[in-house]
Image: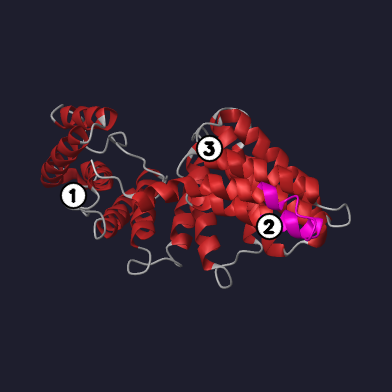
Amino acid sequence: MLIDSSTEQNEGLPEAQVRAALIAADDPSASPAERAEMLMEIARGLQLKPRSAQQLHDAVALYRRALELVPESDPLLAARIRAREGTAHQALPDGGAEALDAALECYEAARPHLQTYGLPEELAELDINLGLVTQSQAGIGRARITDAIAHYHHALRVFTRERHPREFAILHNNLAIAYLSIPVIDEAGKLREALAVQSFEQMLQVINLVDHPSEYAMAQNNLGNALQYAPSKHPIANILRAIEAYDEALKVRTPRDTPVEYANTIANKANALCNLPDNPEHPELGNARHLAAARALYAEAHALFSQYGLSGNAAAVAEALIELDSPTPFGEAILPIAKELQ
């Protein structure tokens, strides 16, 4: 087998960068603050496209060495380094709950000085990351999802649609996912589903099919899911809007280019069709035509899920196909196949 020597050299480059950075950290010709900033920038570079978890661990080590160099007279630089270190912990694929705890500790240590000396955008970015960490901890029962939602709302005070459209879209996507992760057990839960719909709609005001195709497709798919299961006095109207959203997502998602995402979306569309009367003005006439269309979509999704080894999704679709052939009364909703929120 031929070896590409340039690739081999590039793979060793991060290790060489780390060694060079640690040597430069002891260079007396630069001030401690300058050396700390240099280490911070090299660590950030390791985080951009890490080829392994080790590069993220190396980034953490460089951030900590940088903190040792920061003079006490520069609390803002120390806060910035701590905030960046938190993102490295957060990105560790092998860190688990311990990495989340370390990230949270970094963010909380950085907050007071960023609040006093930093830019509003720096504090808002910290709130985004605090929200993400808290949301992950809530998923394992170690935090409250409502605290994550509060962090996102704090960040939205700075990251407005007009001035920071990218961050605005990210925040509303995160908010919608947080809202939908809360079980619907009371009227407040129903309200949160409606808020999720609003957040996806807000997101779609700043992204579009041409400039952000994958994000646009994801948002439309998730908007369809939220619409389909959100409570409404006009459920048929919601289902029709959900189908429109899925069709928008399918302008990007195709069986050739994005087969798994395509399968998710057509399965979700099939769910909606199962609950849509053929004639919305006369729902009592049933939905035989839409059930036939749903059956075809489920079958196509099942084949793709099976082909790509997604046995859980394939089993859920198979169960939905069985339900279609059972005497389920019209209007009794079939459970979602793929509430994809990514």
- Distance of label 3 from label 1 (alpha carbons): 35 Å
Task: Find the magenta span and give its range.
Answer: 22-38
Place of residue 13 in the rendered image (x, y in percent of width and height, measured from the top left): 50, 49
Total residue callouts: 3
Q: Residues within 10 Å of mark 1 (few under 14, many from 20)?
A: some
* Callout 3–callout 1 Cβ contact below 8 Å: no
Question: Tag 2's secondary structure?
Answer: helix
First in sequence: mark 3 vs mark 2: 2
Place of residue 39 in the rendered image (x, y in percent of width and height, measured from the top left): 67, 52
Q: Nearer the viewer, residue 296 or 277?
A: 296
- Picture disc at residue 54: 3
In this view, the mark in front (3 or 1): 3
Query: Which residue type carries mark 2?
Result: Met
In this view, the mark in front (2 or 1): 2
Q: Is residue 232 visible?
A: no
Residue drawn at the location 39% of the way across and 57% of the way down: 215
